[in-house]
């Protein structure tokens, strides 16, 4: 997020998908930070909104400000540690819906391109086969129209901006991306990327649980 970014978080009610004594699962709207920003005027975020309603809310993972969809929060330190391991050990499974520019072919595939920060152009990330960290994404085409493709993305790793950079590297930037898209692909009201599903083990019961947030576009 560049320093000249103007933060205007959406004034919408909390959308809680599930809660119990150990976890809260919420549907984050696009345009709302996951955690407070470092600069003044960026304090409003999903974490602070949830903490105002549930004082024991603890952060587990993040979504980019421009991305909407499923986020899980812990309500105890033990649950936070357990859920953190679900992500770190890649036991948590996620799918995203994206609309990308152009006709993505074939109808499914696997991307294996290492990523690292583009330091002179932060917060941009880039493909770097020498210094990048491993990053893998599976894709499955849902539908095409004349100029775009709707696709389901399944990240197998959790690198910063992974889906955005992987799609760009394929020649199909995600529509509305203020960092990576250019020209007609950038001219949309929001980043067309939504965290559709999240599945992992419950920190108390240990059973496999799944949550879905309907795609808003």
Image (cartoon, rainbow, N blue to C red):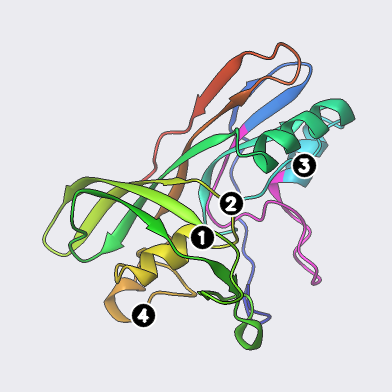
Q: Nearer the viewer, residue 2 or 127?
A: 127
Where residue 105 appears, as percent x and y from the top left, is 18, 58
Identified at 21% across, 59% down, the residue is 104
Give the Cα distance between marks 1 and 2. 7 Å
Query: Taken as a whole, is the magenta stretch helix, strand or loop?
Result: loop
Give the Cα distance between marks 3 and 1. 20 Å
Give the Cα distance between marks 1 and 4. 18 Å
Give the Cα distance between marks 4 and 3. 33 Å
Identified at 86% across, 27% down, the residue is 78
Looking at the image, residue 34 lies above or below residue 160 = above
The boundaries of the magenta stretch are 26-46
Tell me, for residue 158, which label it has, or none: 2
Residue on which the image places disc 4:
182
Residue on which the image places disc 1:
162
Give the Cα distance between marks 4 and 2. 24 Å
Mark 3 vs mark 1, foreground winner is: 1
Can residue 189 be seen? no
Task: Report helix, strand or loop for mark 2.
Answer: loop
Q: Earlier in the sequence, mark 3 or mark 2?
A: 3
Mark 1 vs mark 4, foreground winner is: 1
Looking at the image, residue 132 lies above or below residue 158 = below
Can residue 152 be seen? yes
Q: Earlier in the sequence, mark 4 or mark 3?
A: 3
Looking at the image, residue 206 lies above or below residue 157 = above
């Amino acid at each position: 997020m560049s320093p000249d970014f103007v933060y205007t978080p959406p004034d919408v009610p909390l959308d809680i998908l599930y809660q119990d004594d150990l976890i809260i699962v919420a549907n984050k709207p696009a345009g709302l930070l996951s955690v407070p920003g470092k600069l003044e005027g960026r304090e409003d975020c999903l974490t602070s909104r949830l903490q105002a309603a549930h004082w024991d809310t603890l952060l587990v993972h993040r979504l980019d400000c421009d991305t909407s969809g499923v986020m899980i929060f812990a309500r105890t330190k033990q649950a936070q540690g357990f859920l953190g391991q679900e992500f770190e050990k890649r036991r948590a499974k996620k799918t995203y819906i994206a609309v990308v520019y152009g006709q993505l072919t074939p109808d499914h595939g696997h991307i294996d391109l290492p990523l690292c920060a583009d330091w002179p152009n932060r917060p941009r990330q880039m493909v770097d086969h020498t210094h990048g960290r491993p990053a893998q994404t599976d894709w499955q085409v849902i539908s095409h129209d004349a100029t775009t493709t709707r696709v389901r993305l399944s990240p197998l790793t959790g690198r910063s901006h992974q889906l955005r950079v992987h799609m760009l590297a394929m020649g199909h930037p995600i529509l509305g991306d203020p960092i990576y898209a250019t020209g007609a692909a950038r001219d949309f009201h929001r980043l067309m990327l939504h965290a559709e599903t999240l599945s992992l083990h419950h920190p108390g019961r240990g059973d496999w649980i799944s949550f879905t947030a309907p795609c808003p576009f």
